[in-house]
Structure formats: C-alpha cells, structure tokens
Amino acid sequence: MNVRPVFALLTLFSAMTLQAQPKPASSHEFATFGGGCFWCMEAVFQRLPGIIHSTSGYAGGTTANPTYEEVCGHGTGHAEVIRVEFDPAVISYEKVLEVFFEAHDPTTLNRQGADEGDQYRSVILYENEAQQVAAGKAKLAAQANYSDPIVTEIVPLKKFWRAEDYHQDYFNQHPNQGYCTFVIKPKVKKLQDHGVIQKK
C-alpha cells in the first residue's frame, strides 16, 4: 500500500485544523483620560506608536447617554475624554501617561487654553488597581516639570460614553477647520518637533 497519499492527506488535514483554531484573545489594553478638547487629545494619540485605536467620548459624570450639548451645559459632570486601545508590547501604560502629561497643561483647573469649563478638566480614569498606581506615579513624576501644582484628577472609570460620530477622527477629517488650524495643528507640530509623536 502506498502510504504517501494518505500521509499527505493527513498533513493537509492537520494544517487546516490548526488554521481553523480560534486566535488567542487580544492582549491589547485600554486607557481613558481627558485633558481639554477631545479633538486635540485624539489627534495626538493617533500619532503615537502602539496606539491601535482612539475614541472620543465622555466619562466621569452621572448622566447616562450624554450628548455634546448636555456636557457643554455643565450639568452632567462628564469630561471630554478619549479612550485608547494600545498594544503593551509596543507602548506601556506608563508611556501613555507620560505623553498624556506632555500633551496638555495639567496645572490649569477646568481649562485648557481658551477652552474653559469642567468638561475640559485634566483627568485619568483608571480601570484597575495597577492603572491607579501607575497614574499616581506618573502624576508625581510629571510634577517635576511644572512650577504650579498639577490638578489632574485620578478616578475610577465607571462608564465610558462614546461621543457622536461627527466628533470621531475630527482633526484628520477637518484639518482646515478653524480650531484645527489654530489650536490642534500647533500642538501636534510641537510634540512632533520634540519627538514625542510621529508625523502622519
């Protein structure tokens, strides 16, 4: 009996079986934080190696399914935040926080530049104890770069609410819009010139 065809068939079946096995669960992690307008933060982190995806949204308040208008009305308690999915094999949570503190002024209470209101507050929303500890250490380390005290809040993430579609990927979609031209572009360029983020 010629066993070669049988062996070849078994080999092919084994290969097909291996390919059909479900892939391991994703090892990606998430980080949620706010530091002013979420358009700005999103534009920065979209240019950071290791960031898989970023989503603009609202968190830190009490109102369910908040709208942009409600958040701007200061009655929800929510901050404008972004939630990033990142690959810890490429970038650590600690590095994400380091860039977060470089990407905004964490010493101004409820304000970033001309954007004023509690929705623009500096806040890190941790998802587990490890993130809470890392956030505390990052805040302490960042303080060395500022003469004024850092006012960044470190609070647990209870619920992230995705912002309306028109807020997503805003800078890339509207690079010539006024706010993008005069606020976001200079911020992105400064961080690119300092080697903090990549050009895109």
Image: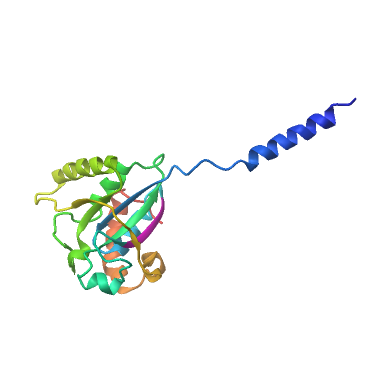
Q: Identify the residue shown where x is 88% and y is 26%.
A: 2
**Side (left or right) of 149 relative to 11:** left
- Judge whether 38 appears above or below 68 on screen: above
Magenta segment's dominant SS is: strand
- Judge whether 199 appears above or below 66 on screen: above
Regarding residue 185, the answer to whether it shows in the image is no
Q: Quadrant of residue 95?
A: top left
Q: Quadrant of residue 33?
A: bottom left
Image quarter where the C terminus lies is: bottom left
Q: Nearer the viewer, residue 137 or 61?
A: 61
Q: Residue furthest right?
A: 1
Q: Identify the residue shown where x is 39% and y is 71%.
A: 166
Q: Identify the residue shown where x is 74% and y is 36%.
A: 12
Name the spot of residue 173 as percent of width and height, x first.
41, 68
In the image, the segment drawn in magenta is: 52-57
Name the spot of residue 110 as percent of width and height, x first.
16, 62
In the rendered structure, does residue 56 fall within the stretch colored magenta?
yes
